[in-house]
Amino acid sequence: MKQKIFTFLLIAVAGLTACRKDGVDPTIKEFDEQQIQSYLSSNSLTGFSRDTTGGDTTGMYYKIINPGTGPALEWSDRVSLVFTVKSYDGKYTSADTITNHFDDYLGHLQQDGLPKGLQTAIHNVLKYKGASMRLQIPSRLAYGKSGYGSGSVTNVNSRIAGNQCLDYYVHVIADQPAYDDLVIRNYLTANSLSGYTKTASGLYYKVIVPGTGVVGSINDLSVVTTTYTGAILNGTSFDEASKTTAYEFTPATSDGLAGLVSGVSEGLKGYAAAGTSISLIMPSALGYGTSPPSSSGIPTHAPLRFEFQITTVTQLE
């Protein structure tokens, strides 16, 4: 028994020694560099450059996909981002650019929970609005030895383990209305949706069932009874409370039409009446923009889709 234990210890020591250089543990910089090189090689990723800003100190590798234009970004500039991220161990992947939105000053990015390396690379390497890149962030500029998130490190997509390098894609939006419109058009194509009309404001609407009432009769003083749903464009619903149970929008309360997001107000007032079934897809500026309700799960700058089936329309006397 003693011989077996001694043999096991020898094997364990030999394994640890193999990870060292000349019997010395690698520094975190050396460890990160080894991990990045191995990741690039094993995933056949080419065309990456090493970030040498400030004397080759970051250890990040990047590949510019679109260069962008305009003045160079400053820390005080407000930026709108979409991104994807994957940890090197494959246990954390967040690839939905519908939900992965960020809007704040560039200098606040890290305090908002995104990695220091991403903030630094946008400022030093990506530089311009309209630009996009793929970025390899060493663990020391990601979330370090503590990692990020909640739950066990063995959980998938709930926690980034400690000492994990990160593979990011990031796009800095230059023109939010144009980007939102592209997202909506891609959504329509991907879901084989047709028959929508685009208004001057950027709202897309489709009358599925024409109403029996007079189009244009709905206004801020109307009492509207309707069933409806609301969702972001990945299909996640944020409002299904009135999917089957009729809801009444009443001007005398905060739930009147005047209190709705502008895309819904425009769609119902301009193209619906009693009996109408209508679908509305709107850019973020006609939805909640940069200030979605905190408990809704709606990301900042999220295009939205609403479906309304209007039962009755009456006017306050």
Image: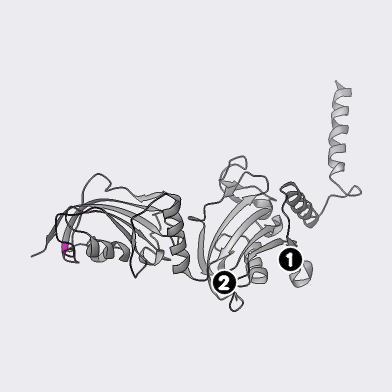
Q: Which quadrant of the structure image shows residue 254?
A: bottom left
Residue 109 location, x and y as percent? 57, 65
Tell me what residue is drawn at x 59 percent, y 68 percent.
Answer: 131
Q: Within 10 angstroms of label 1, few (less than 14), some, or many (20 or more) residues?
A: some
SS under mark 1: loop
Residue 213 lies in the magenta stretch: yes
- Colour scheme of this structure image? one colour
* Residue nearest the viewer, comparing 220 with 251: 220
Please give the label number shown on residue 129. 2
Q: Within 10 angstroms of label 2, few (less than 14), some, or many (20 or more) residues?
A: many
Tell me what residue is drawn at x 50 percent, y 60 percent.
Answer: 101
Gap between marks 2 and 1 measured at Cα: 19 Å
**Viewed as shown, does residue 98 lie left or right of 39?**
left
SS under mark 2: loop
Most extreme residue toward the top is 1
Most extreme residue toward the left is 317
Closer to the eye: label 2 or 1: 2
**Quadrant where the N terminus lies?**
top right
In the rendered image, which residue does mark 1 sit on? 51
Residue 265 location, x and y as percent? 27, 64
Q: State which tag comes first along the sequence, 2 or 1.
A: 1
Q: Which quadrant of the structure image shows residue 67?
A: bottom right
Tell me what residue is drawn at x 66 percent, y 62 percent.
Answer: 117
**Viewed as shown, does residue 152 lie left or right of 246?**
right
Q: Is residue 149 above or below residue 125?
A: above
Residue numbers of the magenta segment: 209-222
Residue 35 lies in the magenta stretch: no
Q: Amino acid at mark 2?
A: Lys
Q: Amino acid at mark 1?
A: Asp
**Viewed as shown, does residue 298 lie left or right of 108?**
left
Most extreme residue toward the right is 22
Residue 96 location, x and y as percent? 52, 52
